[in-house]
Image (cartoon, rainbow, N blue to C red):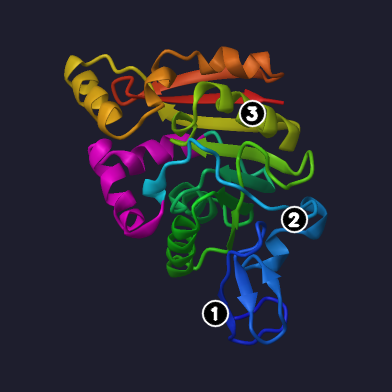
Amino acid sequence: MYCPKCKQQTLVPYMGWNFGTHLCKTCGYIGPLFIEDVPKKMIKEPKLIREPKYYRQEFKGMLVNFYDLSFRVVLLGQEKKMRERFLKHISTEMKTILDMATGTGSVAIAIKLAFPKISVTGIDLSEEMLHIAEKKAQKQHSRISFLLQNIEKTQFKKEAFDAITLSFGLHELPLENRKNVLKEAYRLLKKGGKFLIMDYHRPRSKLFSFFLNIHIFLVEKYAKTILNQDLQKELQKYGFHKTKKELIYGDLVQIIVGEK
C-alpha cells in the first residue's frame, strides 16, 4: 500500500498506536490509510486503548473471517436491504460521518459508495476486523479511514462530525456502558448533527422471536436487554431531540434517529 505522506509503496498494517492503523517503513508515518480524511484538528493526543472487560474475544483471531457470513445468516440474507433503509436517513448536506463499531466496515463502505463526497471514518476495537474492513474498502476503491478506537470514549475532539452511525453494535455492550456511547455520540456531533442507530428489536413473529432468542442465548450475552430498552427515550435523556423510531423486517430491526 502507498503511504499518504511520502507516496512510497511501503505502508503496512500497524496497531501499536490507537488512532492509526498503518506504519510507513520509509518515512515512519503512523496513521490512517488516507491521512486527509482525518484532519489532525479532529484528533486529541493518542492514549493507550484498553479492551473493556465485556469485550467479546470472538472478535479476534480467525473467527472474524466468518463474521459477515454469520451476520447474513442471522438476518436471513436481508442485511443489504436493511442497510439501504438505514442510509435513507443520511443526506448530501452531511460532510463528515463517523461509523461507530464499524466491524468489517459494511455500513461505512455503503455510505461512501452512496455519498462519495462525504468523509467517512469507521472505528472499532477489533484490529482483525479493521484489517478486513480496509481490504473491502480497497476493493470498492472507497477512501475510508478505519481507526482503532473505543466507542465509549473516543480520541476525537468535540463537535467533529455531522452524523454518527451505529449499526448492530449497541447490543454488544452492557446496559450501563451503552449510556457512555450515547453521551460520547452527543459530544462528537456538531449542532444539528444526527445520531443513527440500527439494532435488534422484539419481532412480531413468534418464529422470529424463537430464533432470535436462541441466537441471543448462544452468542449475544448482552443483547436481551436491548429488546426491552426504549432507545428513543434514552436519546432524549442525553439531550437529543426530534427523535424518531422506525421498525422494519417484521419489527426484528429498529432504526432510531436523534438530532443534537
Residue 45 numbered tag: none
Q: CA distance from mark 1 to mark 3?
A: 36 Å
Decide: is 85 above or below 137.
above
Membership of 104 in magenta stretch? no
Q: Residues within 10 Å of mark 2 (few under 14, many from 20)?
A: few
Q: Nearer the viewer, residue 235 or 175?
A: 175
Residue 231, position as x, y percentages in the image: 53, 18
Q: In this figure, which residue is indicated by the disc labeled 1?
A: 1
Q: In this figure, which residue is indicated by the disc labeled 2?
A: 46
Tell me where the magenta segment starts and ends, as one range. 60-88
Q: CA distance from mark 2 to mark 1?
A: 24 Å
Residue most extreme to the right: 41
Decide: is 26 above or below 69.
below
Q: Main secondary structure of the magenta part?
A: helix
Q: Secondary structure at mark 2?
A: loop
Q: CA distance from mark 3 to mark 2?
A: 20 Å
Q: In this figure, which residue is indicated by the disc labeled 3?
A: 180
Residue 146, position as x, y percentages in the image: 57, 58
| Residues marked 2 and 1 touching at CB (< 8 Å) | no
Membership of 87 in magenta stretch? yes
* N-term mark: 1 or 3: 1
